[in-house]
Amino acid sequence: MTGLSSVKAEISTLIQRLRVEAARRDQGLSVAPVSLHMVFAGPPGVGKTVVARLYGSILRDLGVLEKGHLVETDRAGLVAGYVGQTALKTQDTITRALDGILFIDEAYALVGRAPGETDSFGAEAINTLLKEMEDKRDRLVVIVAGYPGHMQQFLLANPGLPSRFTKTILFDSYKPEELVEIFHTTARRDGLLLDTAANPLLQDFFKLATTGLDFGNARTARTLLERTREAQATRIAPMLGAGSVDLNTLTVADIIAAKAAMA
């Protein structure tokens, strides 16, 4: 994965800790409990879901979780329309995540929008989650995700949350040069070639994009690639019946047209 050096370091440290504890267990030594629940704090499009999925695979390979699969949800997947039904809906979602990871995106939506404001439905979901995290602690890992400030508000909404989520991993926004690399990597994965002369154009685009209110990090890079493919299709489609056509190369002209479409 491009960038995310601090995230990779945090996950690596945890892996080494789990390996050491496993070695101690194999030798009959005392083993200290390791909290696997986490807060992933960061803006959209920085790979939180991807890292969570990889984390599940790692825990499976280490023998910590039997399956290591990821169940992704949000407020809508936990909260029901009537009092009393939320606990059942939350339990159903947790059951699907047993032996794997429950990833709750925008978890702060479960608490009141303003300090001191209460959300009875969200509170019911949180209380159910906390109980199941304790009762199923050997079979369930929970990751809650969202903007850093909002996640602080989430942790303060219930006294039981800070003790369950003792580790917060911060995901920084991608730098323009990292977004250029993501653009290239995604294009190669799709079997496309990019004219290297387009790199300055991409760099300038992402520098400007990072200042916009709708900036989506890697999502913005993927959207630009999609617009570039559309520009390429518009350029080469009329030539398809005329003989050999380069279907793989994205040109500078394609990037310029894509930038204009997103302006």
Image (cartoon, rainbow, N blue to C red):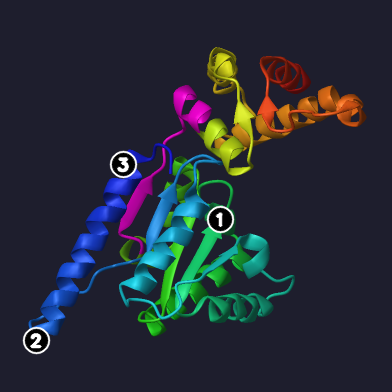
Q: Position of residue 234 (x, y in %)?
A: 85, 26
Q: Residue 189 carries which label?
A: none
Q: Which mark is residue 6?
A: 3
Q: In which quarter of the image is residue 120?
A: bottom right
Q: Residue furthest front?
A: 243
Up/down of 30 relative to 122, above or below: below
Q: Say which of 245 and 132 sits in front.
A: 245
Q: Position of residue 193 (x, y in %)?
A: 61, 30
Location of mark 1 (residue): 105
Specify whether residue 178 is painted magenta: yes
Tell how many labels: 3
Badge 1 local density, few (<14 within 10 Å), some, or many (20+)? some
Up/down of 166 relative to 29, above or below: above
Residue located 55% across and 19% down the image: 196
Report whether 109 appears left or right of 167.
Answer: right
For the residues bearing labels 2 and 3, Cβ distance under 8 angstroms? no
Please identify the quadrant where the N terminus is shown. Answer: top left
Kind of residue sitting beneath label 1: Asp
Location of mark 2 (residue): 28
Q: What element carries label 3?
A: helix
For the residues bearing labels 1 and 2, Cβ distance under 8 angstroms? no
Report whether 154 appears left or right of 159.
Answer: right
Of labels 1 and 2, the one closer to you: 2
For the residues bearing labels 3 and 1, Cβ distance under 8 angstroms? no
Up/down of 204 relative to 26, above or below: above
Please identify the quadrant where the C terminus is shown. Answer: top right
Give the mark, 3 or 1, whose residue is nearer the N terminus.
3
Badge 2 local density, few (<14 within 10 Å), some, or many (20+)? few
Q: What stretch is highlighted in magenta?
A: 165-181
Q: Is mark 1 on a helix, strand or loop?
A: strand
